Image (cartoon, rainbow, N blue to C red):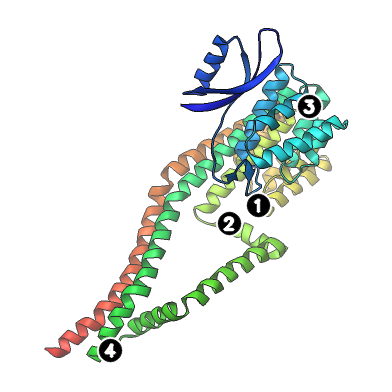
Amino acid sequence: MAKFSYTGKDQTGNMTKGVIDAISREEAGSLLGKNNITPIVISEEKDIFGKLKGVDILGHLSLSDKLMFCEEISTLINSGVPLAQSINIIKDQSTKGVVKKIMASLLADIEGGKSLSDALAGQSKYFSPVFINMVRAGEASGTLDKALEELAIQTQKDHELVSKIKGALTYPVVILTAMIGAIIFLMVKVVPSISGLFNELDAKLPITTQMLIGLSNLMVHQGLLLGIGAVAVIVCLYFAFQKIESLKWGLHKAILKMPIIGKISLKFNLARFSRTLGTLLSSGVTVLEALEIVSHSTRNIVFSAEIEKVAEKVKNGAPVAEPLKQSKIFPVMVSQMVSVGEETGNLDKMLIKIAEFHERQIENFTKNISSIIEPVIMLIVGVAVGFVVISIITPIYQATQSIK
């Protein structure tokens, strides 16, 4: 049995909220209906890692948080609830500290006379330019609820893509972590005891064994310093790649060229580009403005720069398909489908089809990624373990041969 917080209308049309025990969201809605309450929003109350007494330790607004915000506020506005009251309801129902803080700030701005898009712009740390501009377009056309529904779909697709990629990479990461842990254990616990045996036998050690024992001694006696040094190097590299544009450019370009990661990254960026651009166009945003917004929505700066080139050429009068065709990043299929979309006047719908195509490819690829990566991991594990085993067995074998 779970707890569900709800907001709804009673028989007299007054807003009411509370908490109800039910097995599922559907059962909660059914129970509320039996109590003559028409539910508007039903949210399951959970204890999630990263919260402590309602305060979000990480201060992070996840994709699922944004999805919930879009769905809830769209439903509330559709039900005739005023915008300020809708945000206040979301704030009161949330148990996540960062959501409460953001909702409180949005509420203060809206009550101060700002539009929702302007209020969201004040929270640009949490909401992307795409998110803000789609809300602005919805406000301008009087279809804010529809714009929020489109945002919910967009956010849901992003969430699904990220989840699939993370899920596909979990297995390789776990295996590599286990391998590194096993090697550290061998170097710290097993090799030192065997090196003592080698000293007693007074055996002549091969160069591989000498390297292994030297590394083991270093890890045993200077392990703390090595650990601190490794962390320091990782942190320095992280900030260097974040702050130095040339390094960041080189890294992002290398990611796109990697055998497996590069393929996933390219398809992910193509899917996000196509869906975001298509959604913006369907919301009434102009092509040029939409391209400029999308160029700032991707984290890969090489891909972002390519979109900026497309936007510049479109600004000079070229159709979107032309610079896409000239691009070295965008596949030919994308430019061809965009060209058809422009000719038929259905560019927004064609972009959504392109996004769906690449999303299906990512889904199929992530299903098979374990079988693709597993042989590579096994080879790495085999080489690492083989080196350790041979380095240990070879001098023992030589010593036993000399005894004979």
N-terminal-most mark, 4 or 2 = 4
Q: Which of the 4 image quarters holds residue 46?
A: top right
- Whether residues under marks 3 and 4 lie with C-beta atoms below 8 angstroms apart, the answer is no
N-terminal-most mark, 1 or 2 = 2
N-terminal-most mark, 3 or 4 = 3
Q: Which of the 4 image quarters holds residue 162?
A: top right
N-terminal-most mark, 2 or 3 = 3
Q: Amino acid at mark 1?
A: Asn
Q: Secondary structure at mark 2?
A: helix
N-terminal-most mark, 3 or 1 = 3
User: Crowdedness of circle 2 by 10 Å Cα count: few (<14), some, many (20+)?
Assistant: some
- Which residue sits at x=64%, y=44%? 55
Q: Secondary structure at mark 1?
A: loop
Q: Quote the CA–CA distance across marks 4 and 2.
A: 47 Å
Q: Amino acid at mark 4?
A: Asn
Does the image show residue 295? yes
User: Crowdedness of circle 1 by 10 Å Cα count: few (<14), some, many (20+)?
Assistant: many
Look at mark 3 in the image and give the residue it sits on.
84
- Which residue sits at x=22%, y=89%? 201
Q: Quote the CA–CA distance across marks 1 and 2.
A: 9 Å
